[in-house]
Image (spheres, helix red, strand yellow):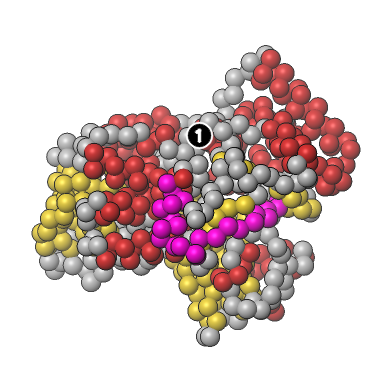
Amino acid sequence: MAGTTIQTNAAWGQPALSSDQAAIDMDSDILILGAGPAGLACAMELSRKGRPCTIIERDEQVGGLAKTLTIREGEHVFLTDIGPHRFFSKNQYLYDFIEDLLQEEWRQVPRLTRQFIDGKFYDYPVKPLQVFKNIGPWKSFRILFDYVLARLKFGLLRRPMTTFEDYVVANFGRTLAEFSMINYTEKIWGIPARTIHPDWARQRIHGLNLWSVFKDICKKALSGGKRGTSGPKSLVDTFYYPQFGTGRIYQEIEKHLVKTGSTVETSSEPIKVHHDGQRITAVDVRSPDGTVRTVRPKQVVESVPITRFLELLDPAPPAPVLEAARGLKWRAQVYLFLTLDKDSVTKDNWIYFPNKDIPFGRTSEMKNFSKDLCPEGKTSFFVEFFAFETDPIWSMDKDQVLDLVMPYFEKWGFFTRKDVRQAYLMKRPCVYPVYDMEYDRRLEVVKQYLDKLENLIYLGRPGRFRYTNQDHSLEMGIVASRMILEGRKYDLDAIGAESEYFEKGPIYEKRI
């Protein structure tokens, strides 16, 4: 069995200019660093107003974490996202934005998600009879008892919620919180739940608790298991997805930008950002051929990881800012993509694995997002590991990771090693900003410094050190374009801060 290792988005460096690199000066009205969802959405909106941009992207392909990779195996072509992506938003403008790009490729997909806990599968949305059968009457009673007890402690007695652990215990009770939330969260972040900031819960699951889940089940039962076609719908049931992978959104944006006069440079990177304390005055950019040119932009939009962007600044930020930045931590990911001589593994879009004795955290089968992502009669399986770059998994090669996961898949009856056509290993740093108990204080120090640069807008998950999905990153880019066009400030951190469960909102209906 053949295979390969794909290193995606390696660390942003800051090498010195060598004497044989020709420095070329050029002007650009708007320079965008990073061609992920936020940067491309900003460029797209600006181009619609007749404002071309220069976009610099370190990877060979646009899209950031939302790109779709093409894997060719002879006559067979497999497409895969870098992890599962689904689109849901409360902003109708975003749906129109994407439909204008993709037309009939923009499709609605039923969602099937499960959790695998203690050797058993649990459907999501929750099926009470299934849960009761799997965990038994005693544990079901403990879940209800602990929930009532938690509501008394945190509700009636007003015990403060100072950590993520407090938040989930308050809203679900200790037994349920430890059953599937605390352990999975610790698996993602690599630190104890008692040291994770409650902002993580407020941002992702605000408004979701055991009572809201129960009410949702009752509503569904009373409606015969169906939801209406108008008004709010829960996006745990269905979502929108491009026919040929979520990266199609960004490929189409790139085509539009080039057609309308913008410049998109891949395999290029900023190596130094000059400033005078008030404005960015120039950016040194290295092209694929090694030449370096100096761009003198009037406006800079960047979505480079915020900690690494600080390293590019010349002169360097003050010591307290650098010290605060060093305290901001990132969680990396390792991905194993398997192509299979098998028609199907499961019907799930993705499966979560909260138990810590299972080394990976999530799997997805891309064929269940769109049948066009795999050749007929074959499928693929995407396996995700959460890691720090100092963890053993980060230094493993493809064969070692494959040997690590195969016993689990064979034991569960998913597939055998003989079913595996090829394996591809990918590694990506700076995927998840870690919300530890000090992150907000440190981030505020960094942001206060960057906000002094009046022609800089920093955005996206990496640029703002804020965990957002692609819809919020797109919205940030659109808002950033309006900041430039209107010459005014908007609160980018308000995007994605809805005071309700992160995955609830109106399902978009296609325009006629």
**Which of 241/318 is in front?**
241
Region in magenta: 93-115
Most foreground residue, 57 or 443:
57
The residue at 55%/81% (across/down) is: 76
Name the residue at 37% across, 50% down: 38
Q: Residue tagged by mark 1?
A: 498
Residue 464's x, y, as percent? Answer: 38, 41
Q: Position of residue 202 (x, y in %)?
A: 54, 32
Residue 270 appears anywhere in the view = no
The reply to whether the magenta stretch includes residue 48 is no
How packed mark 1 is, by other alpha carbons closer than 10 Å (few <14, some 14-19, many 20 or more), is some
Tell me: residue 286, above or below residue 150.
Answer: below
Counting labels gives: 1
On screen, residue 16 versus residue 174, left or right, reads: left
**Residue 506, quarter of the rendered image:** top right
Q: Residue furthest top?
A: 157
Quadrant of res 446: top left
**Which quarter of the image is occupied by the N terminus?**
bottom right
Does the magenta portion include 100?
yes
Relative to 30, say whether 484 is above or below.
Answer: above
Judge from the rendering whether residue 383 lies leftward or rightward of residue 451; answer left or right. Answer: right
Q: Is residue 53 left or right of residue 477?
A: left
The part of the image, by quadrant, that contains residue 36 is bottom left
Residue 263, given in percent of the width and then of the height, sits at 24, 62
Q: Is residue 508 above or below residue 291?
A: above
Q: Nearer the viewer, residue 122 or 390?
A: 122
**Where residue 159 sits: x, y (%)?**
63, 18
The amino acid type of the residue labelled 1 equals: Glu
- Residue at the farthest front position: 512
| Residue drawn at the location 21% of the way across and 54% of the way down | 50
Residue shown at 49%/55% (left/top)?
512
Is residue 346 at all visible to an observer of this figure? yes
